[in-house]
Image (spheres, rainbow, N blue to C red):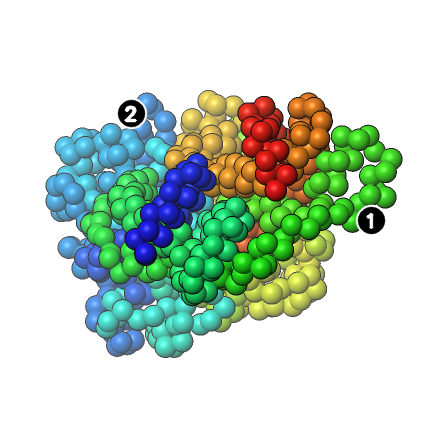
Amino acid sequence: MRGLLLRRMLRSLWRIRFRTGVMLLLIVITTLTGVMMAEFSRNGDAVYEEFYGETNLADLVVSTEDQYQPAGNFSAACSAFGAADACETRLALDGQFLRDDGEWIAATLYGHAGSPAISSLWFSEGHAASGAGEAVIDRHVQEELGVGLDDTVTVSLAGKMQNYTVVGIANSPHHLFYVASSRTLIPQEGAYAVLYLPVAALAADAGLEPESRNMLLLDLPGTPAYDLQDTNEDEGVALRELKWELASALRDEGVEGALVGDRGSIHSVELLRQDLEGSRKSIPMTIFLLGAVSALVLAISMERLIRTQYREIAVMRALGFSAVEVRNHYLLVPLLLGSAGVTLGVALGAWFSVGMTSFYFDQWGIPLVRVAHYPDLWLAVAAGVMAIVMLFSLRPALHASRLTPLEVMGQREIKRTQAWAQRLTAWMPVTMGLGVRSTFRKPRRLLLTVAALGLALVILGGWLLTMSSMTGFMRDSLTEVEQWDAQAVFMPQQEPQMRSWAANHSGLEAEWVSVLPGSPAGDDRTFMVWGVGQFGDGGMHGFRLTEGELPQAGAQPVEVLVDQGVAEFLEWEPGDVVSVEIAGSAVEVRVTGITLELTRTLWLHRDDLVAITGWEMVNLVMLRNVDDAALEELEQQALVTRHDDLVAAFDSSMEKYQAIIYTFLVIGAAIAIAVLVNTLIINLTERDAELATLRVLGASKWRLSGVLLVEHAIIGLAGGVIGVAVAIAASKWMVAVFTTWLFHFPLFIDWMVALYLFLFILIAALATTLIGTWRIRRMDLVKSIQEFSQ
């Protein structure tokens, strides 16, 4: 008997094979996405853990920026500190790298003493540089600029030209995310070069003392936990005490203004961690949303299947089948479809995870250590999807089990339209009024249809609105806020040389700026402090104030602007007096306004910054009305960024990530279309008996088509409104998940995109009217008359 029931159920699913296929597709997509994202996230953790372990990533990093110290001072401070297993000093200098096409690009040169054991290099070719005139290039330089072993490269260092022979190619754990500085969030291919040299040779080439250093790296016992910048908890309490002890030891040895950071202060390490963490956070909610949409469609389809089989259910109960047997019989639908869907989804997800992991790390130029598969993740995702599917399908199955023969036979009464609907449609044309009354005659059916249409946009709409907001904010930050044609970054000691260059080129406008690192007092999170000469009109950086006003020079306490990300994470508001550390100096400042910026920043007048630090320093200049010839001359002395190149880099980076973006958009679109078509077709099939009755009573095919058009227009309008609302809610959730200290952007709803989403639902609803018209034309009126007469 059970075999007979199983064959009967399979035949039932085959008769509605289109809807069966849609339900199966949704379950496959849900499982595929879950497995792909989960394996990608765990593989990412494994890659970083193995890479950082092999290269022995530093636990603590001390930087004095442009204030060079004797290596002995660092070593003495490390010995006095006493809690480190090992300490190593470095020399890091900014310069310019000459590309083959004659363009100068930003460069960072690191001086290593001997064979480094902390934050060491991962060699893919060659060996370490050991003498003057030799250099190791970062692997990104090889991939982006085509430089190889034994090639000669030219670098401008401290205004002097230096040539180096490439003897090795390697990756550094500090530069997996490959940008010129922590102020940059957008990698620009072919616009940055990193070289690794013997420290004595680098100091000599830069005209510095042989023992000059500006970095100290420390390896602590084990892998101490550090404070994560994207949480409100302090995960690095024990490490914080060690940093205070180290800072005290450095001051005792005469190392002033040192910034002591942990792994979270390394821009590349923290940004990649947060990027992977955002993916990990989104996995459970993504699986739940996709699973809920799939399960809802399955539940609606099951309800329709059960309604068409009321008589069969009555016969089964009359033959002695218990309620439990009927329930289990209909639970075969989610069990069969769920089992087949998750099995296929797991297989495809494991296959896609390899491609996604390889693509992701290839985009960053990170050496892929290994890609593994994890059966425990397969089981967890499959169990989660099956649980959601079975849970949503339980109610229709219970409804079927509670039906009795008497109830089925008693469902023949005529359902009259509500009085309010009759009054509402009394003034309407016959076709329109009939369509409106028909739509609201079964509120539950209408509610389920509209809800399914709205949920169809939870992924597609959420991604579109989020990406539209993010790209719009970033583009506006580059095109509308920045009013300079070029900017140059240089060493503070080069200021006289830079001012002389500016004076020799009449007509150009220059705004001199001081940029220093800073942080909230007692907090590991860092921001960049910009001391500018001018706020408001005439300045080359515009401010998009969301609250407050611009700061005034010379005020006490010093007045500052902070960006919205800093304000939200630290809960600062205009009028607050807060304590910050700037270049090792603690000071209280008053927040006067909140501004929208790409990176975490604090802005104040340059004279106020000089008063805080006690010394005047300029290391950046923004330029306007400067010609290409002057910029080419400047590129040999400083790191020059053209505004047009920055915008082009943004466009290029968006193109680079289109594959990942399109993957999720395709998944969202496939789900949306599947849900739309399935739900609307179910709505049509439920109308067959009603339409056939009207057709038998003399209604024309065109009038019935008009009734369907009105009904689907109402469904499309309601579903579109709910769909846009759901998409906005989904985009808010996505922004909350992906927003971190390093990567923060506000959500601006693009109402044109919202309108497109609304029209997508409405047009899809209206388009299915054609299917209804086709069904009306193919109606068997003889059969319909027989059913009506019964």
Three-letter amino acid code at disc 1?
Answer: Ala
Q: Is residue 473 left or right of residue 162?
A: right
From this view, report whether residue 600 is shown above or below residue 686. below
x, y percent for residue 665: 46, 38
Residue situated in front as seen by the camera: 190 or 738: 738
Position of the C terminus by quadrant: top right
User: SS class of the residue under badge 1?
Assistant: helix
Residue shown at 38%/64% (left/top)? 261
Neighbor class of circle 2 (other Cα within 10 Å; few <14, some 14-19, many 20+) is few
x, y percent for residue 535: 67, 46
Q: Is residue 273 left or right of residue 376?
A: right
The residue where tag 2 is placed is 100
Identify the mark nearer the N-term, 1 or 2.
2
Position of the N terminus by quadrant: bottom left
Residue situated in front as seen by the camera: 430 or 26: 430
Residue situated in front as seen by the camera: 406 or 480: 406
Q: Separation of disc 1 and disc 2 at Cα?
A: 81 Å
Three-letter amino acid code at disc 2?
Answer: Asp
Q: Which mark is residue 786?
A: none
User: SS class of the residue under badge 2?
Assistant: loop
x, y percent for residue 660: 39, 39
Name the quadrant containing residue 185.
top left
Q: Which mark is residue 419?
A: 1
Name the quadrant containing residue 553.
bottom right
**Contact, CB < 8 Å: mark 1 with mark 2?**
no
Residue shown at 59%/28% (left/top)? 781
x, y percent for residue 355: 28, 41
Residue situated in front as seen by the camera: 541 or 353: 353
From this view, report whether residue 677 is shown above or below residue 420. above
